[in-house]
Image: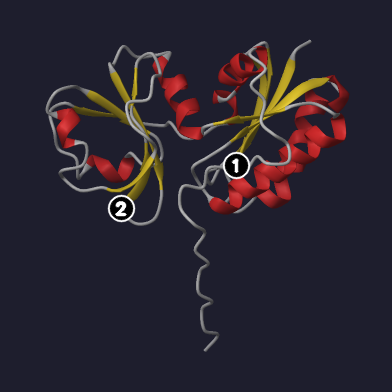
Amino acid sequence: MALILSLETSASACSVALHKKGQLVYTIEIAEPQAHAGKLAVLIDELLKIVSISPQDLKAVAVSAGPGSYTGLRIGTSVAKGLCMGLGIPLLGIPTLLSMAHHVSQATDDKFLCPLIDARRMEVYAQIFDNQLNPINNTEAIVVDSNSFRELLDRQHVLFFGDGAEKCKGVINHPNASFADGVYPKASFIGAIAWQEFEANRFADLVEFTPFYLKEFVAKKAQPIF
């Protein structure tokens, strides 16, 4: 049946989706902070029950490969690898920003698309794509200011979107900049690209695959009790 299970854990929302030949069958999302560890397996089980299939019906598992939340990406990758090893099926690692750009590209004619994932303070993870989803630059961690993306904006219109776009609205004031609301990483965005990768046999190495964290993990300092 060419069924692919997709997992998205790179942001605050946790979601799972099932696609058949790249077409969405069903998806479930939960928007609870730090719920990935306790809820991801539950969501997968719930999804499979709703669509009345067993894990053995899956042909592959696709996981959001980052960048994004260090902890979320680690949990998603661990669960995806466990499923693939247990079921003997391939793993597909799908770049998070690419999956967002693919989703938005279906509904716009804008020449340049810039998905933004919220990082710390005024920082975002960003990458620019043309409307054929060719990357214009490498994924970067950018501290947003009034000059961000200026060189491209002086020449072309750019559509910004993602959970990092909100912090940019009041900072990037350029006539060639526009912003789309309500777009953030979702498992339902992954399936179409995952199907392309599956058909091309571009599978991730189950042992060597690690998410694209972009930055090293920084542990938060414990707060004093008194």
Q: Residue at x 47, y 21 (%)?
A: 103
For residue 202, what is the image quadrant?
A: top right
Residue 214, image x, y percentages: 46, 47
Q: Residue at x 15, y 38 (%)?
A: 173
Q: Are marks 1 and 2 in contact (CB under 8 Å)?
A: no
- Binning the other alpha carbons within 10 Å of mark 2 as few (below 14), some (14 to 19) or many (20 upward) gives some
Classify mark 1: helix, strand or loop: loop
In this view, the residue in front, 211 or 177, is 211
* Res. 180 in view: no
For residue 44, what is the image quadrant?
A: top right
Mark toward the start of the polypeptide (1 vs 2): 1
For residue 57, what is the image quadrant?
A: top right
- CA separation in Å, label 1 and label 2: 22 Å
Q: Disc 1 residue type? A: Thr
Tell whether 86 sits left or right of 61: right
Q: Is residue 139 above or below residue 193?
A: below
Q: How is the image coloured?
A: secondary structure
Quadrant containing the N terminus in the rendered view: top right
Residue 106, image x, y percentages: 43, 13
Classify mark 2: helix, strand or loop: loop
Residue indicated by mark 2: 122
* Res. 124 in view: yes
Q: Residue at x 16, y 26 (%)?
A: 176
Residue 187, image x, y percentages: 60, 30
Residue indicated by mark 1: 9
- Binning the other alpha carbons within 10 Å of mark 1 as few (below 14), some (14 to 19) or many (20 upward) gives many
